[in-house]
Image (spheres, coloured by chain):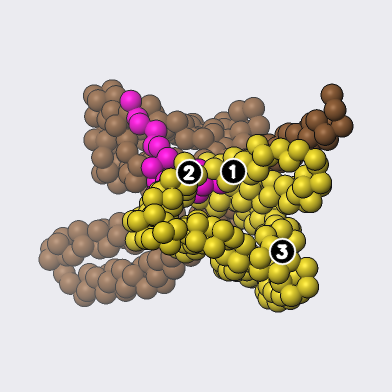
Amino acid sequence: MTATNSEVFTLWITGTLLFVMMSFFIIGFVLQYRRRQLLNEKQRKERELIFQQEMLEIQAEIRNQSLNYVARELHDNIGQLASYLKMQVELYLRKLPEEQASPLEEIREQSQNLIDQIRGLSRGLNSNNLARFGLPEMLRLEIDRFNRLEGPKIIYQEGFLPQELDAEVSIFIYRVFQEIMNNSLKHSGADEIQVSIGLVHDAINLNVMDDGKGFDSAELHEGSGLMNLKDRCELIGAQLNIESKKGGGATFLVKLPI
Amino acid sequence: MPFKLSYILDVFLAHLTGLHYLLFGASLMGLTLLPWLSKSCNRIVPFLLVWSLSDILALFTAIIFKNNSPIFHAYSLVGTAFILSYYYPQLKNLPYMRSVFWWGMIGYFLIWLVNLLYFQPPSIFPSNTIMFSCVLILFFVLMSFKYMLDHPIEESIFVQAQFWFNTGILIFYSSSFLYFFFESFLQKIGQYPIYLLHVIRYPNIIWIICIIIGMLGDLGVLSYKKTES
């Protein structure tokens, strides 16, 4: 190889090296970019999840406060009006001869019934009562209230529940229970609803089973009340399993790890 | 006879290479697609036009005056300004980058002027200024790559025009730098290897192909959607 050829050869080598280096640079860039894209995607999803959780908490808080407000209004306002009505009826009853009192007796009884219903509903809606009475007692009271309504018979079984449950957990379980019960009472057409609650393997299990007309659980679509409830459960780390088929009743199982 | 228009055109057409056709094709493509290209992508089109125009003028002046170096003197300044103006909107918000752009451009102009007056007059090819322009442009390309890494978007990198432009510019300008860095050395070699003159064409072709791919990517031609079975 002559000197000239060797110099040209050196140039070719230099050029080739440059291209190899550039290739490595570009491949390295593409890989690094992909890594950053994935990282970004992960962070974006985390941010979305946090945002959804915060929104959920805000929604739950607003809902809770609204229900508490309605409960107070029921108790302090409508309940008082019902009590006044009953007192007025009793006043007239005292003035009327016994033979004419019968229709008013009926009104008095219905007024008492109305007052009881308002008190029960007010107590059920007010989550502050959870702190006062505890979750098991509130569930029992709510079951009693449902049983007093003209509707399916509700059988309640209570397993072991921790004495000191976190307030947020209690409120969550209680509201989910109310939502599932309202759903069953409204739509299932059941004759009997079995409710059980208890601690199983570090998770609170709430089971609601009805013998109503059922539905195809595979046909539940996004945006429906039950799917929203399911999403809300998942966002706080709980699980809601819904099993149902047409004509075969429905079973709702909520598992909330504590 | 040598200045007869038909003669000039004949010689001009005879000297047009595949590279020229590729460049004119890319420019035509850029002009045609201008309304559909994104704002960040269509900034490359003026540069393509300047490049095409300078190549046409370089061919004509080579035919008529037997020397096209003055065109390259002008192109080394205008082309650099157009490339920098391509990167300016993307990088201007980075710290100090506005100052770097303006001082870089002013500094480059001074180097260009000094080189023109004292080292490589208009009759000599401006390899010195082209080398400086390569360094300046490579700096902004690397900054652009860094910017892309710091601001990744969901879209695949392979359909982003910016990636293809940067890749093409990186390949072409680093090759050009190396080429002109060794040019004086090459001239000194007794038998000037004529094929080395053509070496720089290949990065040039790669760059134009990268620009075309970038424009196609920007139009969404290269992206695909997964079909659900």
Asked whether residue B113 appears in the rendered view, the answer is yes
| Tag shown at residue B201 | 1
| Image hue for chain A | brown
Q: Is residue A123 visible?
A: no
- Whether residue A213 sits left or right of residue B45 in the image: it is left
The residue depicted at 35 percent of the width and 56 percent of the height is: B6
- Residue sitting at x 73%, y 41%: B192
Magenta part of the chain: B207-229
Q: Chain of mark 3?
A: B
- Identify whether A138 is placed above or below B58: above
Mark 3 lies on residue: B129
The stretch drawn in magenta includes residue A42: no
Q: Tell me which amino acid carries mark 2.
A: Thr
Q: Position of residue B216 (x, y in %)?
A: 42, 46
Q: On what subunit does the disc labeled 2 rest?
A: B
Residue closest to the far front: B1
> On screen, A129 above or below A240?
below
* Crowd band around label 3 with a 10 angstrom C-alpha radius: few (<14), some (14–19), many (20+): many
Q: Are marks 2 and 1 on the same chain?
A: yes
B10 left or right, relative to B116: left
Tag 2–tag 1 contact (CB < 8 Å): yes
Q: Give me the chain that's yellow.
A: B
